[in-house]
Image (cartoon, rainbow, N blue to C red):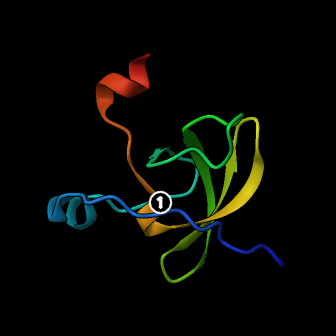
Amino acid sequence: MGFSPLPVSPRTTSTTDFAEFIPQANSWVKLREPLSAYSTDEALLLCEEAGEQWVAWVPDFGVAILGRHQYYRLEKQELAS
C-alpha cells in the first residue's frame, strides 16, 4: 500500500499507556487529534503495517496509516457510549 502517515503532533501521555496497551487488529482506539475537521476522533485498527504503524479505518475519513503516538486505548466507559 502506498499510504503515508498523516502528521499529527503527539501529546504527552503516561508511560503506562504505551506499556500496558498492546494494539490489536479489529480494536477501536481514540485518536489524539481528528485527522480532518469532518472525521471522528476514533479509529478501527485493521492490521499492523510496520513497526509501530497500523492501517486503520476512520469514520468520515477513510483508510489511514497511524503511528503509535496518534492514538490511545479507548477506556471502558468510552466503549459503552
Task: Give the residue pinned by disc 1.
Answer: 70
- Give the residue at the far right of this rendering: 2
Compared across the picture, whether 56 is left or right of 3 comes to left
Q: Is residue 53 above or below residue 18?
A: below
Q: How many marks?
A: 1
Say whether residue 12 is left or right of residue 63.
left
Please, is residue 5 above or below residue 22 in the view?
Answer: below
Query: Is 34 left, or right, of 81 in this rendering?
Result: right
| Quadrant including the C terminus | top left
Residue beneath the point at 26% across and 60% down: 12
Vertical side of 29 occupied by 8: above or below: below
- Percent position of residue 23, x then y: 43, 60
Residue sitting at x 70%, y 49%:
57
Which residue is nearer to you in this view: 47 or 78? 78
| Residue 4 point in image, percent of width and height | 73, 75
Which quadrant of the view contains residue 18? Answer: bottom left
Placement of 2 over or under 62, stated as above or below: below
Q: Nearer the viewer, residue 22 or 5?
A: 5
- How many residues crowd mark 1 within 10 Å: few (<14), some (14–19), many (20+)? many
Q: Quadrant of the N terminus?
A: bottom right
* Residue 70 coordinates in the image, percent (x, y): 47, 60
Q: Quadrant of residue 49?
A: bottom right
Q: Residue at x 40, y 63 (%)?
A: 10
Q: Nearer the viewer, residue 21 or 35?
A: 35
- Where disc 1 sits, the SS reads helix
Q: Amino acid at mark 1?
A: Gln
